[in-house]
Amino acid sequence: MDQFFAAVEQRDRPELRGLPIAVGHDAARGVVATASYEARRYGVHSAQPIVTAKRLCPQLIIVEPRFQAYKEASMQIRSIFQDYTDLIEPLSLDEAFLDVTENKHGLPLGVDCAKEIKQRIFDLTGLTASAGVSYCKFLAKIASDYRKPDGLCVIHPDRAQQFIDQLRVERIWGVGQKTAEHMHRMGIFTGADLRRMSLEHLHQEFGKMGRVFYDFARGIDHRPVVTEWQRKSVSCERTYEKDIFLTEQLTTELSHVAEELEHRIAKNGFEGRTLTLKVKYADFRQITRSITQERALLTKDELLPLALQLLGQVDYSARHPVRLLGLGVSGLAQQPPEPPITHQPQWRELELEFLPW
């Protein structure tokens, strides 16, 4: 979807149409969830501090998020998807992969499905969507972002390699900022540069992801559309209006985070054995510390002592105050049996440089 949260707000509040808006909490530590295209012209973007966004765009209008409204719109969109295929892999409220190779309407081409779905989304919700059509998830994802807003991009197999060769590595799925910087130091700036690297060299530099990058540079991606996936972690975090550095402050805040994490664990029915503490300092430097137990961590009484133990490994002071604390549980307590391998292993998009929260 295009500027999804912002688009819902502009749809429901006509007085905001055509104006630069950002959805987020208007506070010193607030962060932009989504920015309208009018705001993006000033450099405003998601995950940006609200104070920075206001500096870039003084006339920016901050709108408090209404997640229930976004969820309702998402469910309407999902119902349209289901009218064409049951092979749907949601990535977020406003993004999903669809396998329409054999669709319920019998349409011969994926692009025909995309056109119909886009029109039906607009007719039902008043929102525009951008679609990418290709033979694999890697290229479909890139194509969906290629002609926003209200775009439709098709990458044909015969032209895929030419398209990848001219692609900036920053556009390749799985390449975050630090990975891109590493590639630039290696002289890799485009897909063509990446394709010139041997598998051995990429594996040496990027570990298991080296194989992924090697395949992507050649348009190879065998991942199927996965309709169900197993949760690997549960986490929560808090960003503070004012930096904290006193031990009693941090202890109190960790207690609150541990309590919230207990609720999320219960809600998701998750059982994990590894607790990870996430600390972000005032200068945005971030560290994590982890500890693994023999049994599942389910309650605040089990989580908090371990969290405080991890906090004891962290350096904080008036010179190094903390702006964010987070806790997460991962490492399934009971791993399901491995299924027989009938195709290449599946993998999900993660932020490579940081623990996924």
Image (tube, rainbow, N blue to C red):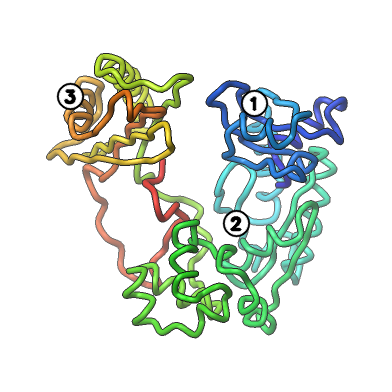
Earlier sequence position, callout 2 versus callout 1: 1
Estimate how packed mark 3 is, as few (under 14), some (14 to 19) or many (20 or more) residues with alpha carbons within 10 Å: some
Q: Secondary structure at mark 1?
A: loop
Q: Which residue is mark 1?
A: 65
Camera-nearest label, 2 or 1? 1
Q: Is residue 168 above or below residue 76?
A: below
State the image coordinates of residue 241 (x, y, percent, origin top left).
48, 20
Mark sitting on residue 236? none
Earlier sequence position, callout 2 versus callout 3: 2
Q: Which residue is mark 2?
A: 97
Q: Check disc 2 and give the amino acid type.
A: Phe
* Front residue (pair 181, 98): 181
Query: Is there a contact, CB below 8 Å, between mark 1 and mark 3?
Result: no
State the image coordinates of residue 187 (x, y, percent, origin top left).
49, 76
* Front residue (pair 25, 89): 25
Say which quarter of the image contains residue 105: bottom right
Q: Which residue is mark 3?
A: 305
Q: CA distance from mark 1 to mark 3?
A: 34 Å
